[in-house]
Image (spheres, rainbow, N blue to C red):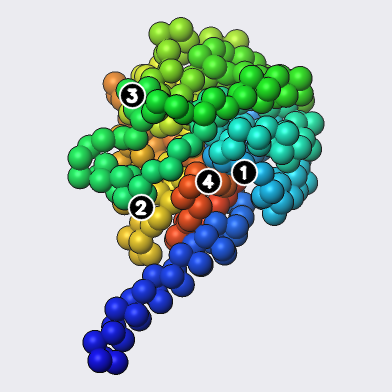
């Protein structure tokens, strides 16, 4: 009888240990990645861009808040927030407090679906099924009936009051120590709020550098940015796969982007042009699936340098 129950109990124990590790340690093991991207015009001085994404703030996440505040010590030239700041309708004050030191720097933001709507309990296995079924979360569908309305307006007002640019289906320009950076942003493609036709046409040519910003890196958006000759696009949303297999990588991206580009720096080609793409793995999780495995939470400091 001992042998009969020993194997199932052993498997259960390993599974429980894995959940404890992924939720109790790795999901709180925040780190900074550093990436160099050769996209600037020749002769332009390097630019240091801090990208934060997918914070998914839940009340009481003190370690995450302290870590986010500490990022101001990097002294970036500017900050890009690629959305999904919330996972709790009460989380706006804590997001604004955690990002307060970073809002002393020039910055810009787009929103993700979780900024607009609170999460609902879901079976995590549904995300894995997308690999087989070709489905991508909420894309093209309205939020479920009864979805919680997050107070995104308060979040927007806080960012705007700090001087950050709201890039919701619009363009903006940051002034960075005598340089100008043109930013073109979209609302979240994951719930089909993107309106590229409102910003189409490519960089104006009036700024020293231009880049695209979006929450979810859907291929239609990447194609449009690349065809319009943006040298760099920043995105988030994927959580880097969130639950990855060591030495293999992500199983899903929660969008139609391939898993080889689920996080980090890569390239995208469309209509004979190629752009750099950086996808942040983000620093949070949905409050109902607070696990990460082989994919620690992160922010990224991108150093933009002259083209090779």
Measure the alpha-carbon separation of dots 4 and 1. 7 Å
Q: Earlier in the sequence, mark 2 or mark 3?
A: 3
> Is 33 left, or right, of 69 in this rendering?
left
- Mark 2: few/some/many CA within 10 Å (<14, 14-19, 20+): many
- Give the crowd class for mark 3: few <14, some 14-19, many >=20 residues within 10 Å: few
Q: Nearer the viewer, residue 164 or 134?
A: 134
Residue contact between numbered discs 2 and 1, judged by CB atoms under 8 Å: no
Which residue in the structure is indicated by mark 4?
Answer: 287
Q: Which sits earlier in the primary sequence, circle 4 or circle 2? A: 2
Q: Which residue is mark 2?
A: 250
Report helix, strand or loop for mark 1: loop
Say which residue appears at 28% left-offset and 84% top-offset: 5
- The residues tagged by marks 2 and 1 sit, at their Cα atoms, a distance apart of 25 Å
Q: Are marks 4 and 1 in contact (CB under 8 Å)?
A: yes
Q: Which residue is mark 3?
A: 141
Dot label at residue 58: 1
Would you call the spot at circle 4 few (<14 residues within 10 Å), some (14-19), or many (20 or more)? Answer: some
Q: Residue at x 32, y 23 (%)?
A: 140
Upstream in sequence: badge 4 or badge 1: 1
17 lies left or right of 81: left
Q: Around disc 1, counting alpha carbons within 10 Å, would you say few (fewer than 14), some (14 to 19), or many (20 or more)?
A: many
Q: CA distance from mark 2 to mark 3?
A: 24 Å
Q: Position of residue 269 (x, y in %)?
A: 33, 30
Looking at the image, tell me whether mark 2 or mark 1 is earlier in sequence order. 1
């Amino acid at each position: 009888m001992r042998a009969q129950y020993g194997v199932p109990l052993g498997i259960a124990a390993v599974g429980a240990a894995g959940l404890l590790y992924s939720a109790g340690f790795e999901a709180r093991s925040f780190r900074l990645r550093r990436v160099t991207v050769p996209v600037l015009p020749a002769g332009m001085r390097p630019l240091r861009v801090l990208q934060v994404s997918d914070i998914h703030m839940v009340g009481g996440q003190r370690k995450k808040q302290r870590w986010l505040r500490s990022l101001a010590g990097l002294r970036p030239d500017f900050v890009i927030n690629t959305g999904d700041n919330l996972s709790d309708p009460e989380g706006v004050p804590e997001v604004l407090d955690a990002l307060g030191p970073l809002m002393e720097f020039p910055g810009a933001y787009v929103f993700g679906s979780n900024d607009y709507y609170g999460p609902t309990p879901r079976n995590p296995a549904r995300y894995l099924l997308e690999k087989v079924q070709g489905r991508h979360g909420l894309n093209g569908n309205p939020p479920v009936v009864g979805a919680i309305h997050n107070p995104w307006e308060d979040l927007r007002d806080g960012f705007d009051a700090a001087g950050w640019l709201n890039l919701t289906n619009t363009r903006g320009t940051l002034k960075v120590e005598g340089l100008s950076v043109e930013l073109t942003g979209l609302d979240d493609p994951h719930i089909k709020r993107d309106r590229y036709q409102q910003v189409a046409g490519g960089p104006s040519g009036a700024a020293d550098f231009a880049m695209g910003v979006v929450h979810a890196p859907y291929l239609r958006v990447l194609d449009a940015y690349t065809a319009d000759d943006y040298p760099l696009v920043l995105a988030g949303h994927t959580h880097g796969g969130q639950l990855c297999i060591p030495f293999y990588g992500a199983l899903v991206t929660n969008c139609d982007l391939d898993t080889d580009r689920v996080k980090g720096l890569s390239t995208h080609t469309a209509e004979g042009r190629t752009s750099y793409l950086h996808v942040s793995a983000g620093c949070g999780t949905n409050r109902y699936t607070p696990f990460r495995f082989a994919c620690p939470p992160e922010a990224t400091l991108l150093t933009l340098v002259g083209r090779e």
